[in-house]
Image: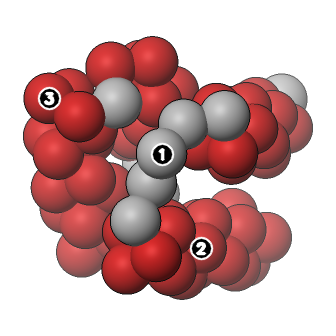
Amino acid sequence: MSKERIKELLSQLREELRNTDVDEELDKMIGELDKDIHAVVERDADVGDLIDRAKGFEADFASKHPAASRFMREVIDTLVRMGI
């Protein structure tokens, strides 16, 4: 269930970002993070720096994209609960 929730949250995050003004560099970084999260979820891998990167994005979103920040926070919380 958590894997499906992460995929759903990532989809919601991408949709939210499509509806906001995000610079090209941030969009690329989000795409890489999205790809990495999907890979980790599919393999049930333990990748601690992935959570740190996600937290860094969430902090940036909090000031620039508050709605996206909420989705990123949920992704992070779900990854932590899964033990990834």
Which type of secondary structure does the marked residue at label 1 adopt? loop
The amino acid sitting under disc 3 is Ser
Taking 34 as reference, is 83 above or below it? above
Name the residue tied to disc 3: 63
Viewport quadrant of the C terminus:
bottom left
80 left or right, relative to 35? left
Taking 54 as reference, is 35 above or below it? below
On the image, which quarter does residue 2 sit in?
Answer: top right
Give me the C-alpha separation between circle 1 and circle 2: 15 Å
The residue shown at (46%, 30%) is: 68
The residue shown at (79%, 70%) is: 42
Which type of secondary structure does the marked residue at label 2 adopt? helix
Name the residue tied to disc 2: 31
Q: Give x and y (percent) for residue 28.
A: 50, 80
What mark, if any, has residue 61 been given in the picture?
none
50 left or right, relative to 1? left
1 or 2: mark nearer the eye: 1
Q: Looking at the image, is mark 1 or mark 3 earlier in the sequence?
A: 1
Is residue 56 visible from the viewing direction of this image? yes
Q: Give x and y (percent) for residue 36.
A: 57, 78
Viewport quadrant of the N terminus:
top right
5 and 68: which is toward the camera? 68
1 or 3: mark nearer the eye: 1
The amino acid sitting under disc 2 is Gly
Label 1: few (<14), some (14–19) or many (≥20) C-alpha neighbours in 10 Å: few
Name the residue tied to disc 1: 21
Give me the C-alpha separation between circle 1 and circle 3: 13 Å
Q: Is there a contact, CB below 8 Å, between mark 1 and mark 3?
A: no
The amino acid sitting under disc 1 is Asp
Q: Is there a contact, CB below 8 Å, between mark 1 and mark 2?
A: no
Q: Looking at the image, is mark 3 or mark 2 earlier in the sequence?
A: 2
48 and 17: which is toward the camera? 17
